[in-house]
Amino acid sequence: MKAIAVYPGKPHSIHLTETTRPEIENIPNGRGVLVKVLRVGVDGTDREINEGLYGAPPPGEEILIIGHENFGRVEAVGPNVAGLTPGSYVVATVRRPGRSLYDQIGLCDMTTDETYYERGINLLHGYLAEYYADDSAYLIEVPPALKEVGVLLEPSTVMEKGWAQARAIQQRLKIWRPQRAAVLGAGTIGLLATLILRLRGLEVTAFARRRKPYLKADLTEAIGARYLSTREVSLQEAARRYGPFDLILEATGHAPIAFEAMEALGKNGVLILSSVTVGQGRSDIPADQINLGFVLGNKVAVGTVSANREHFEAGLRDLALAESAYPGWLKRLLTHPVKGLENYKRLFQLLEEEKEAIKIYCEAADL
Ligand code: BGC
Ligand code: ZN
């Protein structure tokens, strides 16, 4: 079968390769599922892998099949698979268990192992191929009514896990009624975060560099959130005007913003950090002020990576809610389809160059 792969560590090594089609017989305990890949989204992680900054091949192999934002249709199932049947639409999670205690209790997203396993990213092949096979435990069934937007499920899990973490942390307050949130970044993750927080009834202020009007600002306002350009209003000023922010999600990919967010966060607030920053950047920060604000304000900052099954399930519920609360909104995020695996060059060219894009994705096969 066709697959798109890189030589991890080697810049711009993306290429089309021919590999053997995976077989469900190779998945233990009769729980294998063979999935035909329909759509795969690409994001900053894929760009960094192709730049050679991130990612590793499976042990003993030279190439890594990339792609982690997946959507597909079940082709065949092993004898011990319950629930899924050929024709079911599915999304697979990305991380797979390692060895730590957290991995053993179903929280591989919270692993303490040095080595982590992520399909399409680290040590495991991804989904940018004609087929993949996996254990049914890692597959989430998507109702056919959501098939058009199913490729947005994986990116939605960033905010879903962030929200779940914030909720768990804020149990310290006995009563937590967040009213105002800030979302930093208006890419796919930021827009989906704004959506999820709006669906929870919060007043959301979203920040990105560019001045409105343009699509990301329109999409933000279409769901009743406020869009601010940081060229016009600083985060601190906005916090005075529209805060205090009970929750902030940082999803810009630019680490210094995380420290600005610490300053802008309200008392008892929770800051969720989600940007995977692989550079070596340094920056000058008002350390005393940030520290003082955290101490006197009982603030929390929490990092979040990957997601487990429950976050995918929460994401699915929110995609369904979004379709009824804001019909057609999710589809507007799917700005740049690229048809056919063989057009991978176009896919990555858009990823590197198209600043207007929200979701760039490969249509590997028809829905
Ligand atoms: C993926 C996550 C992954 C993270 C770090 C993100 O792009 O969506 O699943 O955990 O990168 O590798
Ligand atoms: Zn990703």
Image (tube, helix red, strand yellow):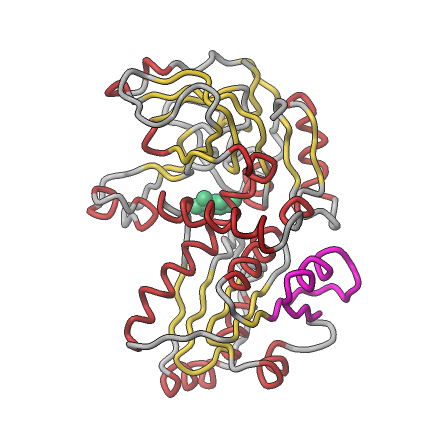
Q: In this rendering, is residue 197 above or below 291?
A: above
Q: Is residue 313 left or right of residue 256?
A: left
* Picture quarter with the N terminus: top right
Q: In this rendering, is residue 336 above or below 27?
A: below
Residue 122 point in image, percent of width and height: 42, 36
Residue 285 point in image, percent of width and height: 52, 77
| The magenta segment | 205-229
In this view, the residue in front, 330 or 231, is 330
Residue 346 point in image, percent of width and height: 72, 31
Q: Residue furthest front?
A: 324
Q: Is residue 45 left or right of residue 138?
A: right
The residue at 66%/70% (across/down) is: 226
Residue 344 forms part of the magenta stretch: no
Q: In this rendering, is residue 97 above or below 195?
A: above
The residue at 50%/24% (across/down) is: 73
Residue 220 forms part of the magenta stretch: yes
Figure quadrant of residue 100 = top left
* Picture quarter with the C terminus: top right
Figure quadrant of residue 218 = bottom right
In this view, the residue in front, 166 or 126, is 166
Residue 191 point in image, percent of width and height: 60, 56
Q: In this rendering, is residue 297 above or below 111?
A: below
